[in-house]
Amino acid sequence: MLRDQGQRSAGLVARRQKGFSLIELLIVVAIILIIAAIAIPNLLRSRIAANEASAVQSMRTITTVQNTYNSSYGAGYSPSLAALGPPAAGAAPTAAAADLIDSNFAAGTKSGYTFTYTPSAAIAGIIYNYTLNADPVTVGTTGQRHFFTDQTGVIRANTAAKAAATDPAI
């Protein structure tokens, strides 16, 4: 009988030894938090860099699309970003909806940036110049730099304020 009790006690001790202690779990959680503290800022910087690269590429796309619009419709540059967007479902492209960019971009936002398109005044119905600004939706979170381009296709950047034609080219 003593022997059985000893075996039972040994069994209880063995059950208590299975699993992790609270200290071991705290150490693992601390290690995970340290790794996260190192990785998250790098992830955010990578996301900002990706958004900025997307904004620059979108500016290049607009320059190309504007030239396509001009050669297709003979009206100079488009009167708005929406005019470069898709037409209503099933409709053919027109000068008012040229189907050259997607609907999100035509609405003025893409990859954490807001795009502001400003055409010059039309002369005899033709728009000869335009400006395009790309500004981060939230500075420091979606992007750091502000971008500018016009009909010349030169993309300029400014880190402190809205970019303009006088800022350095990238």
Image (spheres, grey):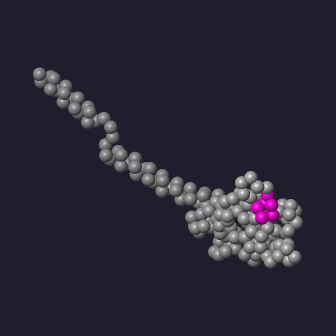
What is the chief secondary structure element of the magenta stretch?
loop
57, 117: nearer the viewer = 117
Q: Is residue 56 visible?
A: no
Residue at 40% x, 47% y: name it: 28
Q: Is residue 140 above or below residue 11?
A: below
Q: Nearer the viewer, residue 105 or 145?
A: 105
**Up-down: is 93 above or below 13?**
below
Rendered view: 157 above or below 54: below
Looking at the image, which residue is at 32% across and 37% down?
19
User: What residue sits 77% from the left and 70% below the top?
Assistant: 79
> In this view of the protein, which residue sits in the foreground, 65 or 45?
65
The quadrant the N terminus occupies is: top left
Residue 36 in sight: yes
Q: Is residue 67 magenta?
A: no
Taking the image as shown, residue 20 lies to the left or right of residue 106, namely left
Q: Residue at x 67, y 65 (%)?
A: 108
Q: Quadrant of the C terminus?
A: bottom right
Q: Quadrant of residue 148?
A: bottom right
Residue furthest to the front: 90
Counting from the top left corner in percent of width and height, residue 131 is at: 76, 72
Q: What segment carries the magenta color? A: 93-98
Residue 20 image offset from top left, x and y in percent: 33, 40
Asked which quadrant contains residue 105, the reply is bottom right
Where's residue 35, x and y in %?
A: 48, 52
Count of residue discs: 0
Nearer to me, 92 or 141: 92
Provide residue 92's location: percent of width, then percent of height: 79, 55
Q: Is residue 37 above or below residue 134?
A: above
